[in-house]
Each structure stands twice: as C-alpha cells, then as structure tokens.
Amino acid sequence: MERIIFYSIALIMVVFAIASVTSRKMLRSVIYLLFVLCGVAGIYFLIDYNFLAAIQLTVYAGGIIVLIIFSVLLVHHIEMQLEIAKLSRQILTAVACMVGLGIFLTTIYSHEFNVVENSRTTTTADIGSKLLSYEAGGFILPFEVISVLLLAAMIGAIIIAKGAKLTGKNDKAL
Amino acid sequence: MNFSYIILIPLIPLVVFLLLGIFNQRIKPAVSGYVGVLGLLTSTLLSFYTAYQYFFVYGKANGVYQTFVEKTVWMNFTETLAIDMGVLVDPISVMMLIVVSIVSLMVHIYSRGYMKGDDGYTKFFAFLSLFSFSMYGLVLATNLFQIYIFWELVGVSSYLLIGYYYTKPSAVSAAKKAFIVTRFADLGFLIGILIVGYYTGTYDFEMLNNPEGNAILNWASTSFMGLSVLTWALILIFIGGAGKSAMFPLHIWLPDAMEGPTPVSALIHAATMVVAGVFLVARLFPMYYFVENGFALNIVAYVGAFSALFAAIIAVTQTDIKRVLAFSTMSQLGYMMLALGVSGYDGHEGLGYMASMFHLFAHAMFKALLFLCAGSVIHAVHSNYLKDMGGLRKYMPITNITFLIAALAIAGVPPFAGFFSKDEILVAAFEHNKLIYFVGVFVAGLTAFYMFRIYFGIFWGKETKYEHKPHESPISMTFPLMVLALLSIVGGFIPFSKFVTADKAGFEAHLNYPLAAVAVGVGLLGIGLAWAFYKNENNLADKMVNFFGPFYKWTSDKFYFDEIYLFITKKILFNRVSAPIAKFDKKYVDGTMVGIGNKTVWTSEKIKSLQSGKVQDYAFAFIAGVVVLVLVFIYMWTN
Amino acid sequence: MIPGISIYEILTITSILFFIGVYGFITRKNLISILISVELILNASVINFVIINKYLYPDMLQGVLFSLFIIAVAAAETALAVSIIIGLYRQISSVEVKDVETMKY
C-alpha cells in the first residue's frame, strides 16, 4: 500500500515540477508548484513526521504560495504568455542538469547507507522540548535567532515593497 | 655640567611653528605675532644662559674650552659610523646660538611692524619659527649628517620665505632659483659627506676634528687624481658651503633672493643662513687645516678673496638698495672665508679663524641692521630703487642714525664693530698671504665707497618728490634698529680671541696699528669719494660712469653670470641632453607602457560581452563549472 | 520509514526535483518563475534532511529541526523576494530578467 502511495506521490511531484518550470502561464506555474509542495507534505506523512507535514502545508502551501500568487496578480496579466528561453539554452541546460543528475545518482547508489530499521513516531512534544531546550544539543539559540530573522525579514519586506514616496524628485528619476 | 636643556632652544621654535602652522587660519594675527616673539624670546634667554654658563662658569678646563655633547643614536651602521641626533656645545656653536638668537629675535619684533596687515601674517611667523628651529639645529649639530639634515631644512625655509609673496612671478622664480642653486651645491656636500663616511668610518665631529684622530692622521692613505681622497671630500663639502654662502660662482641666487620680505633678507640672507657655509668650514676647520697641509683651505681662501672682490665691484653699480646689500653680504662672506683660509691652528696662528668668527658675529649685527634699515626705508617710500629716495634724513631720524652706524661699522671705522673684526682679518691675511691681503684692503675701500654711496643716496642728495610724505617707522620697527645699532657699536670690544679660537685655548689679540691705520685710511678714502660723488647733486658720478664705459655696463649687469648660466642650462643642457632623453623616454619607455595599457583595454573591450549582467548566465556558468569539476575529480579519484 | 521503499528511491526523487529546479532557475525569464524554481530546490533539500534523519538516525531530531528552520528561512526569503519584485515592478514596470541587467559591463 505505502509503495503505491509513494510512487504515485513521486510521479505527481516530478510531473508537476516539470510542468511548473516549463509552463508559459504564470499562474498555472504557481498552482503546479502548489501540487509539488503538497506532494512533499505527503512524503512527510508517509514517514510519520506529522508535525513537519502540517508545517509544510500551512507555511508552504498556505503561506508562500498565497504570497507568490499575490505578487503574480499584482504584476501580471493572467493571460500573459511568458517568454521562453532560446532552444539552444534549454538544451544546454537540460544536458548539464542530466549530467549533474547522473553524477548525483551514481554517487548515491554507490554509497552504502547504514539504514536503521524502525517505526518510531516523533511527537510534536519531542520537537517542542528539543527546540526550547538550552541543554547540550538544544536548539534554543537558533530558535531565537530565526525569530529575529523573521522579524527583520518582515520589516525589510514592508520597507522594500512600500518603496520611496513618489515625490516630484523620484518622478524625475523614473 | 648638564647641557641637555639646550635641546629646548631649537624645540621651542619648532613647537611654535607647528602651532602657528596647524591653527593658521584660527589664530588672530596679533596673537600669532606675540606667540612667535615669545617663543623666540625664550630660546634667546636660554641661549644667553648657555653662553654665560659655557664661557664663564663650566666651559673651561685647563685653560681650554671643552666640547660637550648630548646625543642619542638615531641610525647605526657600524660601531663608529652612526647618525646621531643631539646637541654639541663648543665655542663656535654657542657663539652662533647668540648670533641666531639676537638677530632672529630682532627680526621677529621688527616683523610685527613690517608685516602688519599682510594676509599671510601668521604664515610668515610660522615660517620664521621653522627657520629659527632649523638654524638652531644646524649650529648645534653633532655630526655631518645631522648638519646636512638641518642644512636642507634651512634651505627649505629660505625657499618658503623668498617665495613668500607667491603671487609675484619674480618672487616665485627667485625662490626656485635659490633652491635649485643651493640644492645643486648641496649635491657636492652630500657626496663629500659620503666620502668622509666611507674613508674615515665616522660622521662625528669630535672624532673627525681630533688632531690626533684617525681621520686627520691617515689622510694620505688614499689618493685620487693626485689629491688625497679626504681633500676631495673637503672640497666637495666646501662646494656645499659655497652654495649656501653665495660664493663665486654659485652666488647667483643671493641677489634674486631679495624678492622676499626685507626682514627675511635680514635674517636669512644676511645674518644667519648664508653664514652656514662659513660655519661649516669653521666646524671642520681642523680637518681643513691638517689634511694635505691645508690644500682645501687654500681653495677656500682664494674663492673667498675672489668672491669678496667680485661682489664688491658689482655692489658699486647696483641701484636697488637691497641688491647692493646682497652683494655686500656676499663680499663680506668672502671676507670670512678668506680669513678662515689664511688661518693657522695653534694659539696666535689661529688669528684668521678667530677673526672670521668675530667678523661673522659683527657682520650679523650690522648687516641685519642695514637690512632692517633698508626695510624701514622701503616701508616708507614703497620702492627699492635709489632714484626714488633722497633727503630722507629729515623724515626718518632714527633710521638715518642707525643706518649711519651700520655703514660706519661695515666700512671699518673705529670704534665700531666692523673695524676690529676687519682689522684682525687683514692682519691674518698680511701674515700669510700678501696677495690676499691687498685684495682685502681694496675690498675694504670699495665696501666703504658703495655703502656710503647708498647712504648718501638715501638720506642726503636731492629730495625726490614723494607721493605720500615719508614717516618714521613705528616703535616695533625702530626698537630692533636701536638694539642692533648698540650692538654694532659695542660688539667690537668683546675680547673674542679669549673665547672663540681654532684650538679653543684662547690668546691675547692686539691691534696691529700700522695695518689698522692702512685699513681705516682706505675706508675713509672710500667714504670721502662717496661724499664727493653723492652727498650733493653733481655730475661727478656720471663722469666716472663715462670714464669706465663698457666696464660699468658689465658690472651693473653683474658680469652676465645669470646669462651664462641660462645659456649653459637652456641651450646646452636642455636642448642637447635633456630633450633627447625626454624624447627617448616618451617614445620607448612610455610607449611600451602605454602600449601595454592599450592592449589591455582592447582585450577587455573584446571580452566584456561575457559579463551580460544576467544572474542566470552566471548561474549557468556556475552549475556547468561545478558539473565539469565534479566529473574531473571523479575521473581522478577512480584512477 | 516507509515500508518497502528504500532510501535510494527517495533520494532519487529529490535529486530529480533538485535538477528540475536548477533547470527552471536557468531557463526561466521571469523573476517569479525563478523564485518558484528556488522553492523547488529548497524543498528537495529539505526532504533530504528529513529522509536521512528518519532512515539513518531515527533517535535524533536534528534533521527535522533543521528542516523547520529552513522552512522559516524560506518563508522569510520568499517574503523579501516578493517585496523586491514588487518594488522593482514599481520602478521599471517589469519583472523580466532581461530588463534587470544593470550589472552588465
């Protein structure tokens, strides 16, 4: 059963990922990305990391995708056809990516992973106590740092997107 | 006795210079004048204290003045060859301290009046302090290299002060001329220093000047072109001294240096800096005297005598009063040089040395006085030329009397200072070299003549119509005149032979009455001629001009030396030597470099389109590069 | 641990996703599309963290925590990128890469 689910999720992810990077309609491209992200969440469910899967769905599928859709709607006409790279460029890039993928896969398959058989379920409480632990191996410092980073990013995003006031001087510069 | 406080004497003017230089714009002119005067007053008091301590309290041991040295090693080359920084206290350095202090202080006070209202008032005082610092450092130097450093520093301050009116093209070119000519001479000095360092292994004056020392005893060990190497070195050093002291043929800068403000001429180009050359020869006197039996010293004597004569003749025909004084200075410096040249070493034999230093002292006083008087006159009539003056005695009584005193002093009339020093010089010359003696006497007559020519020309003669009524200068200017006049009167009675002698032992000097009578007679003859020619308006002078005809023309054009130098440098050096070199440099040396630059620009033009500015292109290059690198590494590892 | 699925298969999938992201990053001409490609790349690496944590070190939580941080950073990054894109759009009325090449020689 899990195998079937996994393979179908994998298939969905790959197909929609390709569709996402090749689609010539902006909005569709974003929606395809949404499917890929949901697939990733599915994988997390499969390996029993429910909390992570929830985060993935809320932050990525819920937050980021909405953000991107907003920006698409702000700067594009829905029907606009995106420009596409030159064919030679596409082929060259594809070849480079194929070669890179080949290298990755050969490296992965030639490596012996020391897999530990288990079916352990990680609870949210574990993650929470680890995050807030200040003992050895605790993540309290990165946790705090990341919260400051998020704040900074928020302020930065507001300032940048707000832009300079459109005064006469700026008009002249444009 | 601890003389280490002497270091303060040069340091105070340095501090004043830095203070005035840094806060140039923020200091009120009045304040900067007081700061400059106060700084120098402190140095002067310290100098007098030093002189008292040295000459009367501590200096003598067993009847001989000792040399005190306070120094720190600055650069060490070998055991003995080191460049030190410090102060050396011996009779001539203490005497020079007094001379520099008095004249510099008087010039500082005088400048407060003379430069009043000038835009660069603070700058002027800063430069004066810089000069005082350098001159103090020069006279206190403990070794050849230290003296060289300060030697260049006085050169720089002289350059700055000559070019003080930097908006005047003539002042700028005069400053450049002074700097280049003296710098050219200093090249000789530097080579001399290096030779001395190489062959004797020391720069230290005490070791060089010790009559039983290595440097003097072993002079004959090396020879070059028929002369000992040390003689060559001394001649080269003398070239440096001749450049600074405006000896023939390196004199051409001194008359032009009169473009500077008059107090500067009084301080630098009459009393202190120009005697540096004399001081240098005196400082190395034992070497000059003992090495190769005084061969180099003979050169000094003849160059001095010729310069004295040459300059005196030119001085007779000049119409710019400052230039007359400049040539007079050159002539008197020649006098000091010839006195050194005819001097011996021990006891009374060293009369010439003593006389030279005595004349240096007296000359500093009365020549500074003459310049300051001239400045006072120029201040009143706004012109340098004799034709714009005349009959000024009614308007400027103090200047008149002080100028007269100075003129009598330089003419050698007793009991003024110049009489005593000149008499000693003539006695020394008479005892050693008759030819030089006769030159000396003739120059004494000429000196009296040209000096009274300008005296009568300025203060008597026909009264010129003045645009403004001339007036006596303010007290800040006349006070230094009176002080210096007093010193010119009493200076001659200082028993110099007790204090400053070649062997530092001191001896009794007596007036030689027949020779003194000859000198005074010649001097009075000169004065009488000037009286007859210039006291009242008459055409005797014009008749003399006609009588001498072309000779007068040559003389008033200074024997065309400027033109000769110009011809040599412009026509020969610039056109024949420098121009081809410059061409080669432009065409081949520069050409190669420019070519390389052009090729680089060309190449970058060709490849700049690689920089498209698109992040994705760079990302593609990056990823493709990573892939290729990984492939290469895998290939290498698997083999 | 997914029964019947080895770590190799999952790593293959993530590698494929990663290179699809790279392909998109290089070929797309639009800033938002590039952003999407970056998200793909990021997700591929996040899955790797989690998978390796789960398969190789099930007793630890480092991979999970790191992926949490990556998600947070990615959210911040996206917010900033979107704001930059909007700012850019105000300035030059375009979000095409070809119009943003002032770094050119």
Image (tube, rainbow, N blue to C red):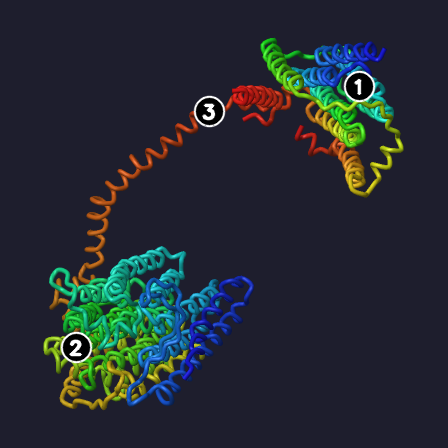
Residue B8 spot, x, y in % from top left: 45, 75
Residue drawn at point x = 84 percent, y = 26 percent: A52
Identity, as a three-letter code, of the amino acid under mark 3: Glu
Residue B597 spot, x, y in % from top left: 40, 32
| Image-quadrant location for residue B325 | bottom left
Residue C49 spot, x, y in % from top left: 75, 26
- Check if mark 3 and mark 2 are on a common chain: yes
Residue A135 spot, x, y in % from top left: 81, 43
Instruction: Decide which of A74, C76 is in the foreground and name it.
Output: C76
Instruction: Decide which of B335, A106 is in the foreground and name it.
Output: A106
B495 w.r.t. C102: above or below: below
- Check if mark 2 and mark 1 are on a common chain: no
Q: Nearer the viewer, mark 2 or mark 1?
A: 1
Q: Chain of mark 2?
A: B
Label 1, on which residue?
A40
| Image-quadrant location for residue A49 | top right
Secondary structure of the residue carrying numbered label 1 = helix
- Answer with left or right where residue B97 lies relative to residue A157: left
Residue drawn at point x = 39 percent, y = 28 percent: B599
Label 2: few (<14), some or many (≥20) within 10 Å?
A: many
C72 w.r.t. B502: above or below: above
B180 w.r.t. B471: above or below: above
Q: Residue B342: which disc? A: 2
Identity, as a three-letter code, of the amino acid under mark 1: Val
Identity, as a three-letter code, of the amino acid under mark 2: Val
